[in-house]
Image (tube, helix red, strand yellow):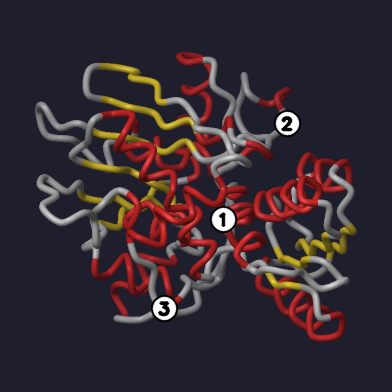
Amino acid sequence: MTVSYEDVVSAAERIGGHVLRTPVLESAPGRFLKLEQLQHSGSFKVRGAFNRILSAGELPEAGVIAASGGNHGLAVAYAARALGVRAEIFVPEVTSPVKLAGLRALGAQVTQTGTIYSEAAEAAAKRAAETGALKVHAYDQPEVVAGQGTTGLELMAQTGGVDTIVVAVGGGGFAAGVAVGSGILGGPSGTAGRPKLVAVEPERIPTLHEALKAGEPVPVEVGGIAADALGATQLGDLAYGILSRAGAQSVLVTDDAIVAARRTLWEEHHLVAEYAGATAYAALLAGVYVPEPGERVAVLVCGANTDPATLAHGRG
């Protein structure tokens, strides 16, 4: 099971009328911020949600079902409402009040259960077996990964190409999709100068880091301020296959570095980001990844579902 560049191109055609072509900000010469936090539902996740649902053909009467820390659920709920189908979303107890309120505002049926994402996912799988609803996985389905990969297609077109893409990782579906969509794996024949991928994770949720060490996805403990969005207990199998073949470089950042990055995005660029959304940027600000002179670097700011009242100070 994998995802091809052609799958991403097809996904772009399929979802084009449903998602935004998010802008790219050149924050300094050769430093680009891809603003996926401005996407419908507040994150890139809506790309994969639309592609999964639209690829399924006729939907069951029960509609769609998903488990999520929040952003994926918001995306599935948004897509379901836009397409006129029912959505049932399972979220863990760590899901923020902002995301819970957003899910309910979108008309989804919400069940909060379990302390972490994997427990909510187990409950959602059991419910899907009972109702026959279409399962929309947060990160480990080809259609979802292909949909997320359309971000990479856009980025390369908007920048004219970059040397390095810096992206946050939880379950790995976004990073894997971007690796394919940006041409790192399986791009058009004759593509030269393929970018490298720097995958950024909180120190307290090192799913890719530990998978690369072990040679396969392995369970990790989940904690820290970005757990509601990056809190997968294990990297997806699909993401592992893609990211390992893409030669992704895994780097870890502290919670303090994530807090500082989020604050900097607001203070210097007036960009709203949640902690997960600022995680990739934290790698550059904290010096965990240091670009070479002249290196063209794109950072994916991937989510904005946060309480805006907390932007001007520390944690919240």
Rendered view: 76 above or below 43: below
Secondary structure beneath dot 2 equals loop
What secondary structure is found at the residue carrying circle 1? Answer: helix
Kindly identify which residue carries mark 1. Answer: 48
Quadrant assignment for the C terminus: top right
Q: Nearer the viewer, mark 1 or mark 3?
A: 1
Residue that numbered label 2 is attached to: 307
* x and y, in percent, of residue 268 in the image: 46, 14
Instruction: State which tag comes first along the sequence, 1 or 3.
Output: 1
Query: For the point 34% across and 40% down, which residue is it?
Result: 283
Disc sitting over residue 217 in the figure:
3
Q: Residues within 10 Å of mark 2 (few under 14, many from 20)?
A: some
Q: How many marks?
A: 3
The disc placed on residue 257 is: none
Q: Earlier in the sequence, mark 2 or mark 1?
A: 1
Tell me whether the residue at label 1 lies in contact with that at label 3, contact meaning CB atoms closer than 8 angstroms.
Answer: no
Residue drawn at point x = 73 percent, y = 66 percent: 66
Residue 189 horizontal side relative to residue 260, left or right: left
In 3D space, how far apart are the residues under numbered discs 2 and 1 (Cα atoms)?
Answer: 24 Å
Amino acid type at circle 2 is Asp
**Amino acid under disc 1:** Gly
Q: Nearer the viewer, residue 222 or 4?
A: 4
> Where on the picture, by quarter, is residue 289?
top left
Q: Is residue 150 left or right of residue 309?
A: left
CA separation, marks 2 and 3?
Answer: 33 Å
Q: Residues within 10 Å of mark 3 (few under 14, many from 20)?
A: many
